Image (cartoon, rainbow, N blue to C red):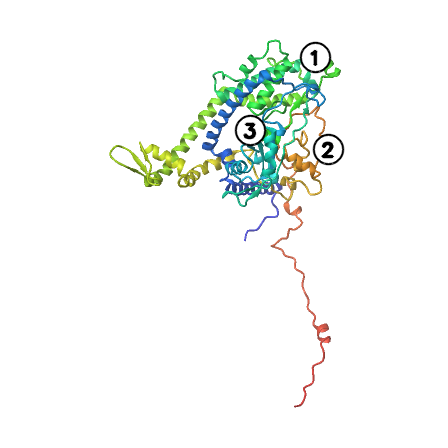
Amino acid sequence: MMQQNDESSPEVYQQRYEEYKKKYIQGIMRAFFDAHKAEEWLQERYSPAIRHRLSLQKNAKKAADAKDFFERVPTMRISFNEAAMSSDSNDVTFTNDMEEGNRILYIRRIPCSCPYAALAEAIKNAGGPIQELHLSDPAKKRDLDFDRSAYIIYATAAAALDAMPKLQNVLVEDPEMAAPIRLQVAQHRSRAPIKTPSYMSLPSRIAFDLEQAEHLATRLDDAVFGSTAPPHGVAAVLGQLAADLPVAARLDVVIAYLRRVHHFIYYAGVQCLDMGDILHAHPALFCRPTATDRDVEDDNAAPHKTFATRDDSALVGWGGWSAALDERIEALVAANAPEKLMARKAADASLVEDIEAREEAALEPVYSSYAEKAGDDGKHRCLLCTKLFKTVDFVKKHIRNKHPELVVDKIAKVGESYMWEAYREDPDRPLPPYDTVNQPSLGMRRPQHDFRQGGYRGPQPFGDHRGGGGYYRDRGGRGGYSNPPPPYYQRGPPRPQYPPPPLPRDLPVDPRQISTSYQDLDQLKDKKVELDFDAALTSLPPPKKKQKN
Protein backbone atom coordinates (compact mmCIF):
# COMPACT_ATOMS: atom_id res chain seq x y z
CA MET A 1 0.00 0.00 0.00
CA MET A 2 1.38 3.38 -1.02
CA GLN A 3 1.99 5.71 1.90
CA GLN A 4 2.17 9.48 1.63
CA ASN A 5 5.00 11.26 3.36
CA ASP A 6 3.52 13.98 5.52
CA GLU A 7 6.80 15.87 5.50
CA SER A 8 6.71 16.65 1.74
CA SER A 9 7.28 20.27 0.80
CA PRO A 10 4.46 22.48 -0.48
CA GLU A 11 6.18 22.57 -3.88
CA VAL A 12 5.86 18.78 -4.14
CA TYR A 13 2.15 18.96 -3.37
CA GLN A 14 1.72 21.69 -5.98
CA GLN A 15 3.57 19.62 -8.58
CA ARG A 16 1.38 16.60 -7.83
CA TYR A 17 -1.72 18.72 -8.18
CA GLU A 18 -0.57 20.14 -11.52
CA GLU A 19 0.09 16.63 -12.82
CA TYR A 20 -3.33 15.49 -11.65
CA LYS A 21 -5.03 18.50 -13.23
CA LYS A 22 -3.24 17.90 -16.54
CA LYS A 23 -4.34 14.26 -16.65
CA TYR A 24 -7.86 15.24 -15.66
CA ILE A 25 -8.18 17.79 -18.47
CA GLN A 26 -6.67 15.35 -20.97
CA GLY A 27 -9.31 12.82 -19.97
CA ILE A 28 -12.06 15.39 -20.53
CA MET A 29 -10.54 16.29 -23.90
CA ARG A 30 -10.44 12.68 -25.04
CA ALA A 31 -13.98 11.95 -23.89
CA PHE A 32 -15.33 15.09 -25.58
CA PHE A 33 -13.47 14.35 -28.80
CA ASP A 34 -14.70 10.75 -28.95
CA ALA A 35 -18.28 11.90 -28.35
CA HIS A 36 -18.26 14.54 -31.13
CA LYS A 37 -15.66 13.37 -33.66
CA ALA A 38 -18.34 12.14 -36.08
CA GLU A 39 -20.23 15.46 -36.07
CA GLU A 40 -19.94 17.93 -38.95
CA TRP A 41 -18.91 20.97 -36.95
CA LEU A 42 -15.92 19.27 -35.29
CA GLN A 43 -14.79 17.73 -38.57
CA GLU A 44 -15.01 21.09 -40.32
CA ARG A 45 -12.94 22.58 -37.53
CA TYR A 46 -10.17 19.99 -37.21
CA SER A 47 -10.15 17.60 -40.18
CA PRO A 48 -7.41 18.90 -42.55
CA ALA A 49 -8.98 17.43 -45.68
CA ILE A 50 -12.50 18.66 -44.88
CA ARG A 51 -11.18 22.04 -43.77
CA HIS A 52 -9.30 22.40 -47.06
CA ARG A 53 -12.37 21.58 -49.15
CA LEU A 54 -14.52 23.87 -47.04
CA SER A 55 -11.98 26.68 -47.46
CA LEU A 56 -12.24 26.41 -51.24
CA GLN A 57 -16.04 26.58 -51.01
CA LYS A 58 -15.88 29.62 -48.72
CA ASN A 59 -13.47 31.41 -51.05
CA ALA A 60 -15.84 30.83 -53.97
CA LYS A 61 -18.71 32.19 -51.87
CA LYS A 62 -16.67 35.27 -50.91
CA ALA A 63 -15.89 35.92 -54.57
CA ALA A 64 -19.62 35.86 -55.34
CA ASP A 65 -20.34 38.14 -52.37
CA ALA A 66 -17.63 40.58 -53.52
CA LYS A 67 -19.17 40.73 -56.98
CA ASP A 68 -22.63 41.34 -55.53
CA PHE A 69 -21.30 44.08 -53.24
CA PHE A 70 -19.43 45.69 -56.15
CA GLU A 71 -22.63 45.87 -58.18
CA ARG A 72 -24.74 47.24 -55.31
CA VAL A 73 -22.37 49.98 -54.10
CA PRO A 74 -23.43 52.62 -56.68
CA THR A 75 -27.06 52.30 -55.60
CA MET A 76 -26.38 52.49 -51.84
CA ARG A 77 -25.55 55.31 -49.48
CA ILE A 78 -23.44 53.79 -46.72
CA SER A 79 -22.97 55.75 -43.51
CA PHE A 80 -22.01 54.70 -39.99
CA ASN A 81 -22.40 58.14 -38.40
CA GLU A 82 -24.69 58.15 -35.38
CA ALA A 83 -26.83 60.95 -36.77
CA ALA A 84 -27.41 59.09 -40.03
CA MET A 85 -28.24 55.81 -38.25
CA SER A 86 -30.63 57.31 -35.70
CA SER A 87 -34.26 56.29 -35.91
CA ASP A 88 -35.50 59.83 -36.55
CA SER A 89 -33.22 60.35 -39.54
CA ASN A 90 -34.47 60.10 -43.11
CA ASP A 91 -31.03 59.29 -44.52
CA VAL A 92 -30.59 55.90 -46.15
CA THR A 93 -27.86 54.01 -44.32
CA PHE A 94 -26.12 50.73 -44.95
CA THR A 95 -28.29 47.62 -44.70
CA ASN A 96 -26.57 44.32 -45.36
CA ASP A 97 -28.84 42.28 -47.61
CA MET A 98 -27.94 39.22 -45.53
CA GLU A 99 -28.92 40.92 -42.26
CA GLU A 100 -32.38 42.36 -42.94
CA GLY A 101 -34.35 41.21 -39.93
CA ASN A 102 -37.72 41.00 -41.71
CA ARG A 103 -36.27 38.45 -44.15
CA ILE A 104 -34.66 36.24 -41.49
CA LEU A 105 -36.24 33.57 -39.30
CA TYR A 106 -34.45 32.41 -36.19
CA ILE A 107 -34.42 28.87 -34.74
CA ARG A 108 -32.97 28.26 -31.29
CA ARG A 109 -31.45 25.21 -29.61
CA ILE A 110 -30.37 23.11 -32.58
CA PRO A 111 -28.24 20.18 -31.28
CA CYS A 112 -24.67 20.24 -32.55
CA SER A 113 -25.17 16.67 -33.77
CA CYS A 114 -27.85 17.78 -36.25
CA PRO A 115 -26.43 17.62 -39.80
CA TYR A 116 -26.78 20.70 -41.98
CA ALA A 117 -28.35 18.72 -44.84
CA ALA A 118 -31.04 17.18 -42.63
CA LEU A 119 -32.04 20.56 -41.20
CA ALA A 120 -32.05 22.27 -44.60
CA GLU A 121 -34.17 19.52 -46.14
CA ALA A 122 -36.75 19.68 -43.34
CA ILE A 123 -36.97 23.47 -43.64
CA LYS A 124 -37.38 23.42 -47.43
CA ASN A 125 -39.97 20.65 -47.35
CA ALA A 126 -42.11 22.44 -44.78
CA GLY A 127 -41.61 26.13 -45.57
CA GLY A 128 -40.67 26.28 -49.23
CA PRO A 129 -37.50 27.51 -50.96
CA ILE A 130 -34.97 29.57 -49.03
CA GLN A 131 -32.11 31.82 -50.07
CA GLU A 132 -29.54 30.77 -47.47
CA LEU A 133 -29.32 28.85 -44.19
CA HIS A 134 -26.65 29.72 -41.63
CA LEU A 135 -25.72 28.01 -38.36
CA SER A 136 -23.87 29.54 -35.44
CA ASP A 137 -20.61 28.22 -34.04
CA PRO A 138 -21.31 25.55 -31.37
CA ALA A 139 -18.06 26.38 -29.57
CA LYS A 140 -19.57 29.70 -28.48
CA LYS A 141 -22.37 27.92 -26.61
CA ARG A 142 -20.39 25.47 -24.56
CA ASP A 143 -22.34 26.55 -21.49
CA LEU A 144 -25.54 25.40 -23.27
CA ASP A 145 -24.44 21.91 -24.37
CA PHE A 146 -22.92 23.31 -27.59
CA ASP A 147 -26.32 23.98 -29.11
CA ARG A 148 -26.49 26.00 -32.31
CA SER A 149 -28.75 28.74 -33.59
CA ALA A 150 -30.11 28.64 -37.14
CA TYR A 151 -30.85 31.66 -39.34
CA ILE A 152 -33.04 31.17 -42.42
CA ILE A 153 -32.76 33.93 -45.03
CA TYR A 154 -35.63 34.29 -47.52
CA ALA A 155 -35.76 36.29 -50.72
CA THR A 156 -38.44 38.65 -49.40
CA ALA A 157 -40.01 39.59 -46.10
CA ALA A 158 -43.36 38.23 -47.32
CA ALA A 159 -41.81 34.82 -47.97
CA ALA A 160 -40.35 34.75 -44.46
CA LEU A 161 -43.68 35.75 -42.92
CA ASP A 162 -45.51 33.08 -44.90
CA ALA A 163 -43.03 30.34 -43.95
CA MET A 164 -42.90 31.02 -40.21
CA PRO A 165 -46.19 29.29 -39.20
CA LYS A 166 -45.41 26.37 -41.51
CA LEU A 167 -42.09 25.73 -39.78
CA GLN A 168 -43.44 25.75 -36.22
CA ASN A 169 -43.00 22.35 -34.54
CA VAL A 170 -41.60 20.72 -37.68
CA LEU A 171 -39.94 17.43 -36.75
CA VAL A 172 -36.31 16.95 -37.79
CA GLU A 173 -34.95 13.40 -37.69
CA ASP A 174 -31.59 11.96 -38.64
CA PRO A 175 -29.61 8.84 -37.67
CA GLU A 176 -26.77 11.06 -36.45
CA MET A 177 -29.01 12.62 -33.79
CA ALA A 178 -29.77 10.94 -30.50
CA ALA A 179 -33.40 12.08 -30.67
CA PRO A 180 -35.56 14.05 -33.11
CA ILE A 181 -36.16 17.74 -32.48
CA ARG A 182 -39.06 20.10 -33.12
CA LEU A 183 -38.28 23.52 -34.54
CA GLN A 184 -39.21 26.63 -32.56
CA VAL A 185 -39.18 29.52 -35.03
CA ALA A 186 -39.26 33.27 -34.39
CA GLN A 187 -38.62 36.45 -36.33
CA HIS A 188 -35.03 37.62 -36.17
CA ARG A 189 -34.75 40.95 -34.37
CA SER A 190 -32.15 43.48 -35.43
CA ARG A 191 -30.03 45.12 -32.76
CA ALA A 192 -29.53 48.80 -32.11
CA PRO A 193 -26.15 50.19 -33.22
CA ILE A 194 -23.26 50.13 -30.76
CA LYS A 195 -21.52 53.44 -30.21
CA THR A 196 -17.79 53.84 -30.55
CA PRO A 197 -15.91 56.48 -28.55
CA SER A 198 -16.62 59.95 -29.88
CA TYR A 199 -12.97 60.59 -30.80
CA MET A 200 -13.32 57.96 -33.53
CA SER A 201 -15.09 60.70 -35.53
CA LEU A 202 -12.07 63.01 -35.51
CA PRO A 203 -10.74 63.71 -39.02
CA SER A 204 -7.27 62.46 -38.07
CA ARG A 205 -8.67 59.18 -36.77
CA ILE A 206 -10.99 58.79 -39.78
CA ALA A 207 -8.00 59.12 -42.12
CA PHE A 208 -6.03 56.59 -40.05
CA ASP A 209 -8.92 54.11 -40.07
CA LEU A 210 -9.39 54.42 -43.83
CA GLU A 211 -5.77 53.49 -44.57
CA GLN A 212 -5.77 50.73 -41.95
CA ALA A 213 -9.08 49.23 -43.13
CA GLU A 214 -8.03 49.38 -46.78
CA HIS A 215 -4.70 47.73 -45.96
CA LEU A 216 -6.48 44.96 -44.05
CA ALA A 217 -9.03 44.42 -46.82
CA THR A 218 -6.21 44.15 -49.38
CA ARG A 219 -4.47 41.48 -47.27
CA LEU A 220 -7.69 39.52 -46.90
CA ASP A 221 -8.38 39.83 -50.63
CA ASP A 222 -4.93 38.40 -51.37
CA ALA A 223 -5.61 35.49 -49.01
CA VAL A 224 -8.90 34.67 -50.73
CA PHE A 225 -8.44 35.67 -54.38
CA GLY A 226 -4.67 35.32 -54.76
CA SER A 227 -1.95 37.87 -55.39
CA THR A 228 -3.52 39.05 -58.66
CA ALA A 229 -5.87 42.01 -58.34
CA PRO A 230 -9.42 40.62 -58.02
CA PRO A 231 -11.95 42.18 -60.40
CA HIS A 232 -14.35 42.97 -57.55
CA GLY A 233 -11.95 43.48 -54.62
CA VAL A 234 -11.70 46.48 -52.35
CA ALA A 235 -9.51 48.37 -54.84
CA ALA A 236 -12.14 47.96 -57.56
CA VAL A 237 -14.90 49.00 -55.14
CA LEU A 238 -13.09 52.19 -54.16
CA GLY A 239 -12.17 52.86 -57.77
CA GLN A 240 -15.78 53.28 -58.81
CA LEU A 241 -16.54 55.81 -56.06
CA ALA A 242 -16.63 59.51 -56.82
CA ALA A 243 -13.30 61.28 -56.49
CA ASP A 244 -14.78 64.02 -54.29
CA LEU A 245 -16.38 61.56 -51.86
CA PRO A 246 -15.48 62.46 -48.24
CA VAL A 247 -12.93 60.35 -46.39
CA ALA A 248 -15.53 59.20 -43.85
CA ALA A 249 -17.82 57.95 -46.62
CA ARG A 250 -14.97 55.97 -48.21
CA LEU A 251 -14.15 54.46 -44.81
CA ASP A 252 -17.75 53.36 -44.36
CA VAL A 253 -17.68 51.59 -47.73
CA VAL A 254 -14.54 49.66 -46.75
CA ILE A 255 -16.04 48.73 -43.35
CA ALA A 256 -19.19 47.46 -45.07
CA TYR A 257 -17.04 45.50 -47.55
CA LEU A 258 -15.09 43.84 -44.73
CA ARG A 259 -18.29 42.82 -42.98
CA ARG A 260 -20.12 41.58 -46.08
CA VAL A 261 -17.29 39.78 -47.89
CA HIS A 262 -14.70 38.79 -45.27
CA HIS A 263 -17.00 38.65 -42.21
CA PHE A 264 -14.70 40.99 -40.27
CA ILE A 265 -16.24 43.40 -37.74
CA TYR A 266 -13.91 46.39 -38.03
CA TYR A 267 -14.73 48.38 -34.89
CA ALA A 268 -14.78 45.18 -32.81
CA GLY A 269 -11.58 43.81 -34.33
CA VAL A 270 -13.21 40.37 -34.60
CA GLN A 271 -12.89 37.88 -37.45
CA CYS A 272 -16.09 35.83 -37.67
CA LEU A 273 -16.31 32.41 -39.26
CA ASP A 274 -19.25 33.15 -41.56
CA MET A 275 -22.52 35.03 -41.74
CA GLY A 276 -24.07 32.69 -39.18
CA ASP A 277 -21.37 33.66 -36.71
CA ILE A 278 -22.06 37.35 -37.39
CA LEU A 279 -25.82 36.97 -36.91
CA HIS A 280 -25.30 35.12 -33.64
CA ALA A 281 -22.34 36.85 -32.00
CA HIS A 282 -22.13 40.32 -33.62
CA PRO A 283 -25.48 41.26 -35.19
CA ALA A 284 -25.28 44.92 -34.18
CA LEU A 285 -23.54 47.50 -36.34
CA PHE A 286 -21.18 50.12 -34.92
CA CYS A 287 -21.81 53.84 -35.27
CA ARG A 288 -19.58 56.86 -34.62
CA PRO A 289 -20.95 59.67 -32.43
CA THR A 290 -20.01 63.23 -33.27
CA ALA A 291 -16.68 64.31 -31.82
CA THR A 292 -16.98 66.58 -28.77
CA ASP A 293 -15.18 69.87 -28.20
CA ARG A 294 -12.91 68.13 -25.71
CA ASP A 295 -11.97 65.59 -28.37
CA VAL A 296 -11.06 68.37 -30.77
CA GLU A 297 -8.96 70.15 -28.14
CA ASP A 298 -7.07 66.98 -27.27
CA ASP A 299 -6.52 66.26 -30.94
CA ASN A 300 -5.01 69.70 -31.53
CA ALA A 301 -2.87 69.59 -28.39
CA ALA A 302 -0.34 67.06 -29.69
CA PRO A 303 0.69 65.58 -33.03
CA HIS A 304 -1.02 62.27 -33.68
CA LYS A 305 0.31 59.31 -35.57
CA THR A 306 -0.73 58.45 -39.08
CA PHE A 307 -0.95 55.00 -40.60
CA ALA A 308 2.45 55.49 -42.23
CA THR A 309 4.01 56.57 -38.90
CA ARG A 310 2.07 54.17 -36.66
CA ASP A 311 5.29 52.69 -35.25
CA ASP A 312 6.70 56.06 -34.18
CA SER A 313 6.62 56.11 -30.36
CA ALA A 314 7.04 59.89 -30.28
CA LEU A 315 3.56 60.39 -31.74
CA VAL A 316 0.46 59.89 -29.62
CA GLY A 317 -2.69 57.90 -30.31
CA TRP A 318 -6.31 58.62 -29.46
CA GLY A 319 -7.12 56.46 -26.45
CA GLY A 320 -7.09 53.01 -24.95
CA TRP A 321 -10.11 51.83 -26.92
CA SER A 322 -8.53 52.65 -30.27
CA ALA A 323 -5.14 51.30 -29.16
CA ALA A 324 -6.63 47.91 -28.33
CA LEU A 325 -8.50 47.92 -31.64
CA ASP A 326 -5.32 48.70 -33.59
CA GLU A 327 -3.46 45.87 -31.85
CA ARG A 328 -6.05 43.31 -32.91
CA ILE A 329 -6.11 44.55 -36.49
CA GLU A 330 -2.31 44.57 -36.68
CA ALA A 331 -2.25 40.98 -35.43
CA LEU A 332 -4.67 39.91 -38.18
CA VAL A 333 -2.66 41.79 -40.82
CA ALA A 334 0.53 40.10 -39.64
CA ALA A 335 -1.14 36.68 -39.70
CA ASN A 336 -2.08 37.26 -43.36
CA ALA A 337 1.36 38.44 -44.45
CA PRO A 338 2.29 37.04 -47.90
CA GLU A 339 5.17 34.91 -46.63
CA LYS A 340 3.10 33.42 -43.80
CA LEU A 341 0.18 32.88 -46.12
CA MET A 342 2.30 30.99 -48.65
CA ALA A 343 3.91 28.85 -45.95
CA ARG A 344 0.51 28.02 -44.45
CA LYS A 345 -0.97 27.11 -47.82
CA ALA A 346 2.01 24.92 -48.69
CA ALA A 347 1.80 23.11 -45.35
CA ASP A 348 -1.95 22.58 -45.72
CA ALA A 349 -1.60 21.30 -49.28
CA SER A 350 1.14 18.87 -48.26
CA LEU A 351 -0.94 17.59 -45.37
CA VAL A 352 -4.01 17.15 -47.56
CA GLU A 353 -2.00 15.19 -50.13
CA ASP A 354 -0.68 12.91 -47.40
CA ILE A 355 -4.19 12.31 -46.05
CA GLU A 356 -5.64 11.64 -49.49
CA ALA A 357 -2.86 9.14 -50.22
CA ARG A 358 -3.63 7.32 -46.97
CA GLU A 359 -7.34 7.36 -47.77
CA GLU A 360 -6.71 5.77 -51.16
CA ALA A 361 -4.55 3.10 -49.56
CA ALA A 362 -7.31 2.34 -47.03
CA LEU A 363 -9.92 2.12 -49.81
CA GLU A 364 -7.89 -0.18 -52.04
CA PRO A 365 -9.63 -3.35 -50.68
CA VAL A 366 -13.01 -1.78 -51.50
CA TYR A 367 -11.93 -0.91 -55.02
CA SER A 368 -10.57 -4.40 -55.67
CA SER A 369 -13.80 -5.98 -54.40
CA TYR A 370 -16.31 -3.86 -56.33
CA ALA A 371 -14.46 -2.85 -59.52
CA GLU A 372 -13.59 -5.31 -62.29
CA LYS A 373 -12.44 -5.18 -65.86
CA ALA A 374 -15.39 -5.57 -68.24
CA GLY A 375 -13.56 -6.48 -71.46
CA ASP A 376 -10.51 -6.06 -73.64
CA ASP A 377 -11.45 -2.49 -74.55
CA GLY A 378 -10.19 -1.25 -71.16
CA LYS A 379 -13.58 -0.50 -69.65
CA HIS A 380 -14.31 -1.29 -66.02
CA ARG A 381 -17.55 -2.05 -64.23
CA CYS A 382 -18.93 -1.18 -60.80
CA LEU A 383 -20.26 -4.42 -59.34
CA LEU A 384 -22.68 -2.57 -57.08
CA CYS A 385 -24.74 -0.96 -59.84
CA THR A 386 -23.26 -2.64 -62.98
CA LYS A 387 -22.37 0.70 -64.58
CA LEU A 388 -19.52 0.82 -67.11
CA PHE A 389 -16.69 3.37 -67.02
CA LYS A 390 -13.79 4.09 -69.34
CA THR A 391 -11.04 3.58 -66.75
CA VAL A 392 -10.69 2.20 -63.27
CA ASP A 393 -10.07 5.71 -61.90
CA PHE A 394 -13.62 6.66 -62.85
CA VAL A 395 -14.91 3.59 -61.04
CA LYS A 396 -13.03 4.62 -57.89
CA LYS A 397 -14.45 8.12 -58.08
CA HIS A 398 -17.92 6.66 -58.66
CA ILE A 399 -17.68 4.41 -55.59
CA ARG A 400 -16.58 7.32 -53.39
CA ASN A 401 -19.39 9.60 -54.60
CA LYS A 402 -22.29 7.21 -55.20
CA HIS A 403 -21.65 4.49 -52.64
CA PRO A 404 -20.48 6.41 -49.56
CA GLU A 405 -21.63 3.69 -47.18
CA LEU A 406 -18.58 1.66 -48.24
CA VAL A 407 -15.98 4.37 -47.78
CA VAL A 408 -17.14 6.72 -45.03
CA ASP A 409 -15.94 4.62 -42.10
CA LYS A 410 -12.53 3.95 -43.63
CA ILE A 411 -11.99 7.61 -44.53
CA ALA A 412 -13.07 8.71 -41.06
CA LYS A 413 -10.65 6.29 -39.44
CA VAL A 414 -7.76 7.70 -41.48
CA GLY A 415 -8.60 11.30 -40.64
CA GLU A 416 -9.35 10.67 -36.96
CA SER A 417 -5.70 10.70 -35.91
CA TYR A 418 -5.12 14.01 -37.73
CA MET A 419 -8.24 15.47 -36.15
CA TRP A 420 -7.14 14.48 -32.66
CA GLU A 421 -3.71 16.07 -33.09
CA ALA A 422 -5.23 19.29 -34.40
CA TYR A 423 -7.78 19.34 -31.57
CA ARG A 424 -5.19 18.63 -28.89
CA GLU A 425 -2.85 21.39 -30.10
CA ASP A 426 -5.58 24.03 -30.43
CA PRO A 427 -5.39 26.45 -27.47
CA ASP A 428 -9.00 27.48 -28.13
CA ARG A 429 -10.35 23.93 -28.34
CA PRO A 430 -14.00 23.52 -27.26
CA LEU A 431 -14.37 21.76 -23.93
CA PRO A 432 -17.43 20.94 -21.82
CA PRO A 433 -17.89 22.78 -18.52
CA TYR A 434 -15.97 21.33 -15.60
CA ASP A 435 -15.64 22.29 -11.94
CA THR A 436 -12.80 22.05 -9.45
CA VAL A 437 -12.85 22.15 -5.65
CA ASN A 438 -10.61 25.19 -5.32
CA GLN A 439 -11.87 27.01 -8.42
CA PRO A 440 -15.58 26.29 -8.96
CA SER A 441 -15.85 29.19 -11.42
CA LEU A 442 -14.25 27.01 -14.11
CA GLY A 443 -17.61 25.36 -14.52
CA MET A 444 -18.62 28.13 -16.92
CA ARG A 445 -22.31 27.74 -16.13
CA ARG A 446 -24.25 30.68 -14.86
CA PRO A 447 -24.95 30.56 -11.14
CA GLN A 448 -28.47 29.68 -10.12
CA HIS A 449 -28.92 32.75 -7.95
CA ASP A 450 -28.24 35.33 -10.67
CA PHE A 451 -28.75 34.71 -14.37
CA ARG A 452 -27.54 38.13 -15.45
CA GLN A 453 -23.92 37.91 -14.41
CA GLY A 454 -22.54 36.08 -17.44
CA GLY A 455 -21.10 33.09 -15.55
CA TYR A 456 -17.41 32.93 -14.80
CA ARG A 457 -16.69 35.54 -17.44
CA GLY A 458 -18.63 38.28 -15.74
CA PRO A 459 -20.71 40.72 -17.79
CA GLN A 460 -20.18 40.74 -21.54
CA PRO A 461 -17.74 43.47 -22.67
CA PHE A 462 -20.37 45.05 -24.90
CA GLY A 463 -23.50 43.68 -23.30
CA ASP A 464 -25.61 40.89 -24.77
CA HIS A 465 -25.94 41.89 -28.42
CA ARG A 466 -26.28 38.43 -29.90
CA GLY A 467 -28.86 37.40 -32.45
CA GLY A 468 -32.39 36.11 -32.09
CA GLY A 469 -31.43 34.15 -29.01
CA GLY A 470 -31.39 37.44 -27.13
CA TYR A 471 -35.12 37.78 -27.78
CA TYR A 472 -35.92 34.65 -25.80
CA ARG A 473 -33.50 35.51 -23.04
CA ASP A 474 -35.02 38.97 -22.70
CA ARG A 475 -38.47 37.42 -22.38
CA GLY A 476 -37.13 35.24 -19.58
CA GLY A 477 -35.88 38.19 -17.56
CA ARG A 478 -32.17 37.59 -18.10
CA GLY A 479 -31.27 41.08 -19.09
CA GLY A 480 -31.36 42.65 -22.54
CA TYR A 481 -33.93 45.32 -23.35
CA SER A 482 -34.72 45.99 -19.70
CA ASN A 483 -31.04 46.43 -18.87
CA PRO A 484 -29.35 48.92 -21.23
CA PRO A 485 -25.79 48.03 -22.20
CA PRO A 486 -22.96 49.79 -20.39
CA PRO A 487 -21.33 52.82 -22.00
CA TYR A 488 -18.77 51.92 -24.59
CA TYR A 489 -16.43 54.84 -24.07
CA GLN A 490 -12.93 54.30 -22.74
CA ARG A 491 -13.19 50.58 -23.40
CA GLY A 492 -11.21 48.24 -25.58
CA PRO A 493 -12.81 46.12 -28.27
CA PRO A 494 -14.36 42.85 -27.13
CA ARG A 495 -11.81 40.32 -25.99
CA PRO A 496 -11.94 36.58 -26.77
CA GLN A 497 -13.79 34.65 -24.09
CA TYR A 498 -11.26 32.38 -22.41
CA PRO A 499 -11.58 30.94 -18.91
CA PRO A 500 -9.32 32.89 -16.56
CA PRO A 501 -6.48 31.02 -14.87
CA PRO A 502 -6.82 30.23 -11.16
CA LEU A 503 -5.66 32.92 -8.78
CA PRO A 504 -2.04 32.27 -7.78
CA ARG A 505 -1.27 31.47 -4.17
CA ASP A 506 1.65 32.90 -2.25
CA LEU A 507 2.80 29.40 -1.31
CA PRO A 508 1.36 25.98 -2.13
CA VAL A 509 -0.44 24.47 0.78
CA ASP A 510 -1.11 20.93 1.89
CA PRO A 511 -4.37 19.83 0.20
CA ARG A 512 -5.40 18.04 3.38
CA GLN A 513 -5.57 21.40 5.11
CA ILE A 514 -8.18 22.55 2.59
CA SER A 515 -10.38 19.52 2.19
CA THR A 516 -13.00 19.04 4.88
CA SER A 517 -13.57 15.38 4.06
CA TYR A 518 -9.99 14.15 4.50
CA GLN A 519 -9.38 11.09 6.68
CA ASP A 520 -5.96 9.58 7.33
CA LEU A 521 -6.43 5.95 6.37
CA ASP A 522 -3.18 5.00 8.10
CA GLN A 523 -4.32 6.33 11.47
CA LEU A 524 -8.02 5.69 11.76
CA LYS A 525 -9.58 7.08 14.91
CA ASP A 526 -12.48 4.77 15.70
CA LYS A 527 -14.36 5.19 18.95
CA LYS A 528 -14.76 2.10 21.10
CA VAL A 529 -18.33 0.89 21.36
CA GLU A 530 -19.42 -0.62 24.70
CA LEU A 531 -22.48 -2.85 24.71
CA ASP A 532 -24.63 -3.14 27.85
CA PHE A 533 -27.46 -5.70 27.88
CA ASP A 534 -28.66 -5.11 31.45
CA ALA A 535 -31.33 -2.66 30.43
CA ALA A 536 -32.49 -4.96 27.67
CA LEU A 537 -32.79 -7.95 30.03
CA THR A 538 -34.82 -6.04 32.61
CA SER A 539 -37.28 -4.89 29.98
CA LEU A 540 -38.09 -8.39 28.74
CA PRO A 541 -41.50 -9.84 29.76
CA PRO A 542 -41.48 -12.78 32.21
CA PRO A 543 -41.51 -16.23 30.63
CA LYS A 544 -44.86 -17.91 30.25
CA LYS A 545 -45.67 -20.80 32.54
CA LYS A 546 -46.09 -24.16 30.95
CA GLN A 547 -49.66 -25.43 31.04
CA LYS A 548 -50.38 -29.03 31.97
CA ASN A 549 -52.23 -31.03 29.40
Which mark is first along the chain, 3 or 1?
3
For the residue marked with disc 1, what is the amino acid? Ala
Secondary element under disc 2, as helix, strand or loop, is loop
For disc 1, the neighbor class at 10 Å (few under 14, some 14 to 19, many from 20) is few
For the residue marked with disc 3, what is the amino acid? Asp
Can you tell which mark lies on residue 201?
Answer: none
Is 20 displayed left or right of 349 in the figure?
right
Secondary element under disc 1, as helix, strand or loop, is loop
Tell me whether the residue at label 3 lies in contact with that at label 2, contact meaning CB atoms closer than 8 angstroms: no
Q: Residue furthest left?
A: 376
Give the distance between the C-alpha atoms of the residues marked 3 and 2, in whole angstroms.
29 Å
Residue lying at 73% horizontally and 72% vertically, measured from the top left? 535
Residue lying at 68% horizontally and 15% vertically, measured from the top left? 202
The residue identified by callout 1 is: 302
**Is residue 282 visible to us here?**
no
Residue 358 in the image: state x and y as whole percent.
Answer: 39, 35
Residue 305 in the image: state x and y as whole percent.
Answer: 64, 14
The residue identified by callout 2 is: 483
Residue 141 in the image: state x and y as whole percent.
Answer: 60, 37
Residue 499 in the image: state x and y as whole percent.
Answer: 62, 35
